Amino acid sequence: MSISQTAPISSGALWTGRVLSGLIILFMIFDSVIKLPPLDIVTQTMVPLGWPADPNVARTLGIIGLISTALYALPRTSVLGAILLTGYMGGAIATNMRVGSPLFSHTLFAVYLGIILWSGLYLRDPRVRALSPSVDKQRIKRCSAPSSSSWSLSSAAILVYAATRPNDLVTQPHGQHQGRAGIDLSADQRFQALAGMVALRKSSIRR
């Protein structure tokens, strides 16, 4: 099932995804912009985390954050931006773990952001929804359910098989030639079965 065939996104889910993504975008813009000058609070915070109090390092982090956020905000590159932001937040988690920061308030803060980030993208982007396990289950269910045309095609195939395999014909006590399924087949019936099979095959290909 292609992306265009996935279930449509409801307006409520779409706007919820936009709000969650908007929160991440606003936070990352704020976090990245304050690193560009950089502000004193940025350099003062970097030293306890093991980073040098170098303005160029802070600017580099700010530029990376802004580029990743811009890619996440654009619909066509939102998945790439989400992946880059996930790596960016992974670096923040590793930094806090290395210096022994408090677990729930500092180390896992980037995890909370990542959950909001991907939840917002899932709700607003059909490409991410298409990768969901629930979509795969629906795909398997639809593929496993035979259509009426497939059943008709199978029935016609049985008739054609019995009509075109004389070796499989057996003689009944009354002298009538019947297939293994016990179906009397005249020449007209054989032709009609073959024509029906071809017509069903063409209709299934068009679908």
Image (cartoon, rainbow, N blue to C red):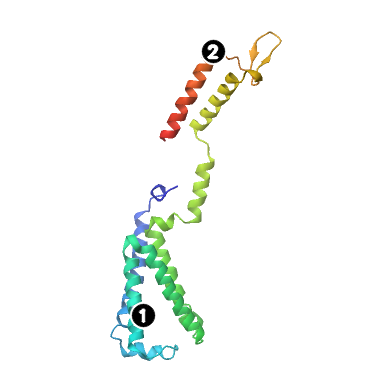
Disc 2/disc 1 C-alpha distance (Å): 81 Å
Q: Which residue is depicted at the point 40% across and 71% down? A: 85
In the depicted structure, whether residue 197 falls above or below residue 88: above
Residue 51, picture quadrant: bottom left
The reply to whether discs 2 and 1 touch (Cβ–Cβ < 8 Å) is: no
Q: Pointer 2: what residue? A: 187
Q: Which residue is depicted at the point 42% across and 67% down? A: 83
Residue 35, picture quadrant: bottom left
Q: How many marks?
A: 2
Q: Nearer the viewer, residue 166 or 14?
A: 166
Q: Which residue is depicted at the point 41% across and 47% down? A: 5
Specify the farthest residue to the top: 174
Return the disc, 2 or 1, that comes first in the chain's sequence: 1
Callout 1: 10 Å neighbours few (<14), some, many (20+)? Answer: some
User: Residue flagged by tag 2: what amino acid is it?
Assistant: Ala
Specify the farthest residue to the right: 173
Residue 71, picture quadrant: bottom left
User: Residue flagged by tag 1: what amino acid is it?
Assistant: Leu
Which quarter of the figure is the C terminus placed in?
top left
Whole-percent x, y for residue 135 in the image? 48, 52
Q: Kindly identify which numbered label has been placed on residue 61.
A: 1
Q: Secondary structure at mark 2?
A: helix
Whole-percent x, y for residue 189 in the image? 53, 15
Whole-percent x, y for residue 69 in the image? 34, 71
